[in-house]
Amino acid sequence: MQVIGREQEDGARWYAVQVKPRREKLAISHLERQGFRTHCPMVGRSKLIAKRPAISREALFPGYVFVHLEADARWRSINGTVGVLRLVTSGNQPSAVPRGFVEKLRESADENGDIAFDDDFNFGDTVRVLGGPFDDLCGSLASTTSAQRVVVLLRMLSGDIRVTLPRAQLVAA
């Protein structure tokens, strides 16, 4: 939690960077060569490789990595980085991800950097969404579609709406 406090003091925030398809590692390598601090949450996904089941490490958010920037950082150079498509912006300014979102992902990672999903949620538990278009909305856990994705019933104006989200975006409400 000290990291969050330090970020609030010096104005440093995490930002999303859209990268070329399946080029997260390449983009991270080149961003780090330029001195940027990066994070790309990884998950193990089961696949058939040569007709045999295997676990491969993939990005939790395919096509995106996170970069940590100071308030006065030279962020325009990110767009010219090998493997990067663009820094996610709103207008002409970078658009920061919600405070605590990347920190929560980093806390959830195991020693290999893979996101470790807790079994602390039970069906029917009240949860809050961190980040994305449903940021800070509350709902109840309805089901799981895989180890990484869950179905949440979000309480909206017209009633409950069923939404599938990455499990890492949920915290207990």
Image (cartoon, grey):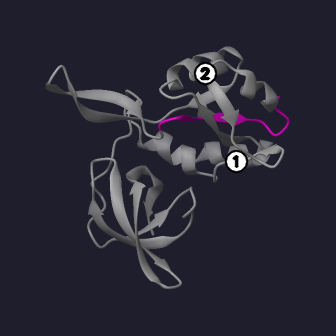
Secondary element at image label 1: loop
Residue drawn where x is 31% and y is 62% of the image: 121
Please state if 95 lies on the left or on the right of 142 as rendered: right
CA distance separating discs 2 and 1? 20 Å
Q: Nearer the viewer, mark 2 or mark 1?
A: 2
Category of crowding for the residue at label 1, using alpha-carbon neighbours closer than 10 angstroms: few (below 14), some (14–19), many (at least 20): some
Q: Position of residue 80 (x, y in %)?
A: 74, 22
- The residue that disc 1 covers is 96
* CB under 8 Å between discs 2 and 1: no
Q: Is residue 68 magenta?
A: yes
Q: Amino acid at mark 1?
A: Ala
Instruction: Using the image, determine if residue 2 lies above or below residue 138.
Output: above
Q: How many numbered circles does the render carry?
A: 2
Q: Which residues are magenta?
A: 62-74
Q: Point out the tag, 2 or 1, that comes first from the N-terminus.
A: 2
* Residue occupying image coordinates x 42% and y 56%: 165
In the picture, which quadrant includes the C terminus? Answer: bottom left
Q: In the displayed image of the protein, which residue is found farthest to the left? A: 52
Which label is found at residue 83? 2
Q: Position of residue 101 (x, y in %)?
A: 56, 50
User: Position of 55 compared to 12: left or right?
Assistant: left
- In the image, residue 9 above or below residue 70: below
The residue positioned 38% from the left and 39% from the top of the image is 115
Q: Nearer the viewer, residue 45 or 119?
A: 45
Q: Identify residue type, mark 2.
A: Gly
Q: Indicate the position of residue 45 as horizontal and vertical percent values.
A: 29, 35
Q: Quadrant of residue 113?
A: top left
- Residue at disc 2, secondary structure: loop
- Judge the density around disc 2: few (<14), some (14-19), many (≥20) Cα neighbours within 10 Å: many
